[in-house]
Image: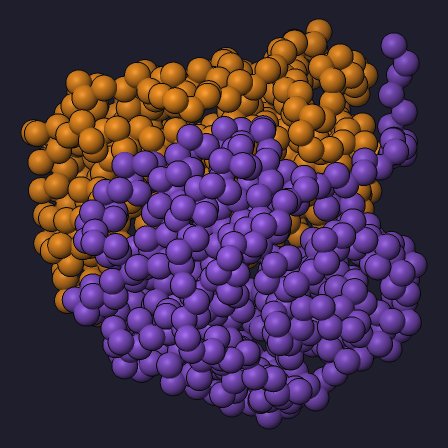
Amino acid sequence: MATDQPRFPFVERTLDNGLRVVVHPDHSAPVVAVHVMYHVGSKNERPGKTGFAHLFEHLLFQGSEHVEGTEHMRIVQDAGGSMNGSTWFDRTNYYETLPSNRLDLALWLESDRMGFFLPAISQAKLDNQRDVVKNERRQSYENRPYGLAVETVLEATFPEGHPYRHPAIGYMEDLDAATLDDVTGFFRTWYGPANATLVVAGDVTVETAVERARHWFGDIRGERPPAPPELVPRPPRRVDVRITDEVSVPRVYLAFPAPSFTEPGFEAADVLTSLLADGRSTRLYASLVHERRVAADVSAYVWPTESVGLLWVVATARPGVDARSLEAEIRAVLDGLREQGPTARELAGARNRSRRQLVRQLDSVGRRADMIAHATVYRGEPDYVNTVFGRYDAIDEAEVMAIAGRVLDPDDGTALHVVPEEEG
Amino acid sequence: MSRPVRTQAPPAGPEPALELPKFATHRLANGLRVEIARTTTTPDVAVRLVLGAGAGATVPERAGLASLTCDLLEEGADGRSAREMAEWIDGLGAAFDARATYDDALLSMHAMNDQLDEVLEFLAAVTRRPDFAPAEVSRRRDMRLDQLRRRGDEPARVAGDALDAAVFGGHPYGAPLVGTVESVERLEAADLAGFWARGARPDTACLVICGDVEPATVLAAVEREFGEWAVPPEAPPPAAPAPPAEAARAGEILLFDRPASRQTELRIGGVGIARGEAGEEAALVMNAILGGLFSSRVNLKLREERGWTYGARTALLRRRRPGPFLLRTAVATEATAGAFTELLAEFERLRDEPPEPAELELAANALTRSLPLQFQTASQLAGRRAEMVTYELPDDYWERFPERIEAVDSAEVRDAARRLLAPDGLVLLAVGAVADFAAELGELGPVHVSPGDRRT
């Protein structure tokens, strides 16, 4: 490969209170990204309290002892920064990018909600953000075509009691059940420094960043997090589900259990999805959309989860094509790849696309902080931002064949058909 | 180690200067403007080709012409079939995107830096020698029609399309860029080829290249691929006509019924401002106070105070001609009428009273201090440069942007609000379970109910 591989320097420290700190200096623009990732997500929710980790994330933007109400957002915007948070199965993150003269501001805000959150909570804030989150569920899922597909697949794929069986947004009735006691307990259990990783990336020296991290976070105390939830075993089985929605054409979702982000084979599974559907020359697109014209679109991707990964293949039918025949067409392409394997040319293209996308995914300090945080929390491996290129380059035909044979198993995974109401 | 002082925000260090990479401007003999800047953070390169083939002058009966033309560029060119073009770009691993706006056609590529020669070869092929073969046009038109027929499935798109039509009527801005089923059905290969031949031409185009590349080598490659590109004899396409002074359906309340909706998609819209017109800065500050930010008035009211929505924002879409001012939110069905009342009260408050100094300061700071974040990556830099080309912004535009924003005073903000938020210039619109709120909304003005369901 002629192109130089980017090299992102970093140092890693663990403070006495257990907070992991990773600093990545980059002086190419006068900005700094601060990213705090807590190792807790929807998989840690208790039965009947789905959606709580995400609702809790909302509350963490509602002030802390020294930061009033919604001041957090106003302060970051006033400094010219951008910010957000997100909740997934395994982690919750809070992040901002600011002009580099405001590093202290970001660390003050993040350390205040890590160390001094409880004095600021109230029933009124909980009730308000519960309503906001219910509207988020309506807007992003219930009132959107195919919006309930993913949660339907999770319910079908994972057995009762499995931590991945429900979506991070949660169910309406469970959101109603959240109490202030839940908020206090959740914070004490999961939001201590020993369960968090702080990444500082951008226009700052390593020495300054480590010193300021210690200054703002060093005196915060918290409990050690409990052991991770037990995984209910998921025996291989094929499940077929059909739901109706207010849509004009069917869509097919295939979800196959796959290597997680912490397991060998994740990168090969990612290359496999690129080979299948990323681009108009790929097998799924060329066959279903271009030549046979049974699908309006097709995509494939793998979820970077901590425990069980899922590889998704999703295709929308053209008018007049039913879901069953579309699924058969998809499976014919998957079977063909399993049997013949990729051509050298296909594989080289998929690797090139993955490499370019990785570079794009790492082009700003905010995106780099995000990947460093994920790699540190999930894999204990901040250097993944550097080693990842070698991993992708090393994937050969045999590895793709092996992963395709293992993952694209017609007797495992979930097939969901979302069909128009009049066909239901 | 000193103990942290947590009781107030830590002081800011000196503000970093905005140091933007310098683009070197060249002009080929055929008039093509070329802008090149080197950045070295990551080994990639971003390319933007700005072409005078936008949708701004296309009548609604032919809506989608510019956009469908862009779709066809990669479907066969320069002796290569659609499949061969796909294998070429996918094999490189590069990304290609072509899209029309109301102002331009914008071709974007992203690639590793050692692939720039082939990327420029690909870009020249799709720009200079696209086939527009009738069979491929027919196939992509069918795909577009499928997409347009599904558009009614999405309440947010139904609302957005209806608002554009209600504000701009028969002006080109009133029709979706992707077109309508009726307009796209009529587009033929010859229409696309003719549109492209006239609009995609070197004398009105600009090629922007930014990344870890050697400028002299890049310029030679550009000369090789684009130097022979001839200027067509016909005149360039006309400019977009002036839009109406106020919303075509100003003063009306348009309701689109979807009885099974679980939420209401709510919009308020009017005619906004053009890029670069007098008073632009005051309008931007007004928008930031009213609804451009999380901490703006409408979001704090509807989300943080009432809990009626996941978010509410306003926007000024600035084009060569005045684009829309719009408010966008989705609220719980039972909150629909209450939300309109609260929003109109916020509009009225900004028309009647100058904003507080603290609000003015927040708006200006958010607009100016955020500039360093917007110029970090090769893709951002190339995109921003392309924007400067499209709107003919001076080279020091961003360096001088803060002083222009900071000069806006509260009376100017109030004046901008009076102009842009005048109640008789706006249209109100909702897509949802109309039976649950139509009667209440009737108290605000004349209500028109239409079906908003995909089956109708």
Q: In this orientation, does residue B374 appear?
A: yes
Residue at the extreme front of the image, as rendered: B29
Q: Is residue A200 above or below residue A82?
A: above
Residue at x 67%, y 68% (from the top left corner): B275
Residue at horizontal 74 percent and vertical 18 percent from the top: A205
The quarter holding residue A194 reads: top right
- Identify the chain drawn in orange: A
A62 lies above or below B273: above
The quarter of the rendered structure image containing the N terminus of chain A is top left
x and y percent of residue B27 in the render?
56, 54
Q: Please say whether residue A83 is visible from this viewpoint.
A: no
Q: Position of B267 compared to A270: left or right?
A: right
Q: Which chain is purple?
A: B
Q: Nearer the viewer, residue B62 or B431?
A: B62
Above or below — where is B32 with respect to A268?
below
| Residue A88 position within the rendered picture, expressed as x and y whole percent measured from the top left | 48, 35
Give coordinates of residue A5: x percent, y percent. 46, 20
Which residue occupies 72% across, 53% down? B395
Residue B407: x and y in percent read 89, 61
